Image (cartoon, rainbow, N blue to C red):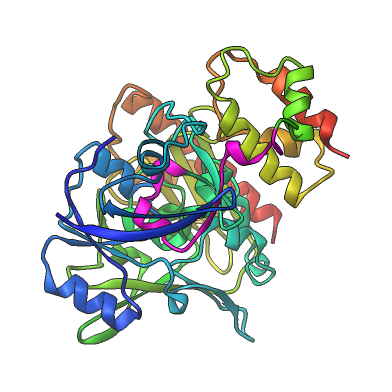
Amino acid sequence: MSSHPVTVTINGVEYEREVEARKLLIHFVRDDLDLTGSHIGCDTGNCGACSMIVDGTLVKSCMMLAVQADGTTIETVEGLADGDQLSPLQRSFSEHHALQCGYCTPGMLMSATALLRENPSPNEDEIRKALQGNICRCTGYWNIFEAVKAVAK
Amino acid sequence: MLLREVEYAKPASVADALSLLAANDGARALAGGQTLINVMKARAASPDVLVDLNGLDALKGIELAGDGTLTIGAMTTYTELLESAEAKARPILGEVVGTIADVQVRNRGTVGGNVCANDPTNHLPPLMTAIGARFHIAGAGGEREVPAGEFFLGVYMTAVGPGELLTKITIPAGKSDGFAAITLGVDGTCICNAAASLNGSLRVALGCVDAVPVLLQPASAEEGAVREAVRGAGIDPPSDVHASAEYRLHLAEVLAVRAARQAQERT
């Protein structure tokens, strides 16, 4: 069995583990590191619930191997809040009722975070396009869109 | 989802990657993984060894030569292409690549991975065929160059053989191009697409109607001539849950006309 040492820094904490080559990044983060904020909605690369920011780039962590993350710096939804202080985007999600069941929320938050970091003043079309890779099965897209728009400068 | 057991290798150079690929029949190059990892989940592919090309800078980057020829490294991601000033020399590239899936997929998916996967529903195979791209394939015996017509060989099959790698794609200068597609949802799976290039004589390539892109050379970009060329090609598209053969045939004509019209508008 192919096993590889992996060192990653997630939300400022360094982790060192041995992983099998076949392990997907999302399983490594959830099962091995117990960071269960990122969700698995479809496991086929469609839903975006597993979105994370790896070395500054938004990715779906079910379409990347854990071993490929060796040496990277990763941001997940757990890293957005500062202790009990929610990020402005998280507060906006709460205020705009941008979550119903909440399953897609970690991915939505990471996609919107990546958008606002690259483009703090997105127009409506840019917000919609940035969230295209994230599916909300409650179909609560309008409030999610409103929450992101409210934070955009 | 748990993948079947697989070995993983991260070569430090293209030469290392080629030796790793040549050393094992079950080895497969891992580019962006946005297709391969999913087909591995479905057990539609079960490589023994993944040779990860991420990190090989020699396979990345976009260059624009003085004569307008674009060279795109196989491991260039869609996002890198979209952000490249050089790639704007052939505007259709960014226009089409910007419609592939979503931000996350475009951040990791690569131009080389798209054409090497040669899924008949991908946009890039017909586009590369219409615009006359040339594919540079490296192997133990050195590098060879093949035109698009000899690159796409069958469903999921290309001229890249065992122990070989696509290193780069060269694209001649030109701006008079068009592209039209009907997809499931805005940027979803493609039902039928057509690419056109009117830099010199008209070239129209149809996608999703056969195992490989179907290249047509209509007498002109006028609607009648383009429809006649599609009808005369004798294509026999597949039927599936998304569209019947008849509907695809209908779309092939309509989309070829739209793509040719767009190319003509840009002359």
**Quadrant containing the C terminus of chain B in the rendered view:** bottom right
Q: Is residue B227 above or below residue B158?
A: above
Measured as percent of width and height from the top left, residue B224 is found at 53, 42
Residue at image location 17% in from the left, 44% down from the top: B4
Q: In which quarter of the image is residue B164?
A: bottom left
Residue at the outermost right position: A153
Q: Does the magenta stretch include residue A67?
A: yes
Measured as percent of width and height from the top left, residue B199 is found at 58, 67
Q: Nearer the viewer, residue A143 or B161?
A: A143
Relative side of B96 to B126, left or right:
right
Relative side of B176 to B5, left or right:
right
Residue at the outermost front position: A83
Q: Does the magenta stretch include residue A104?
A: no
Q: Is residue B50 above or below residue A110?
A: below
Measured as percent of width and height from the top left, residue A62 is found at 40, 40
Q: Which of A77 and A65 is in front in this view?
A: A77
Residue at image location 35% in from the left, 56% down from the top: A67
Q: Quadrant of residue B161?
A: bottom left
Whether residue B224 appears in this view of the structure is: no
Residue at image location 48% in from the left, 28% down from the top: B184
Q: Nearer the viewer, residue B160 or A143?
A: A143
Q: In which quarter of the image is residue A81?
A: top right
Residue at image location 32% in from the left, 21% down from the top: B241
**Quadrant containing the N terminus of chain B in the rendered view:** top left
Q: Tell me the magenta residue range.
A: A61-83
Whether residue B192 appears in this view of the structure is: yes
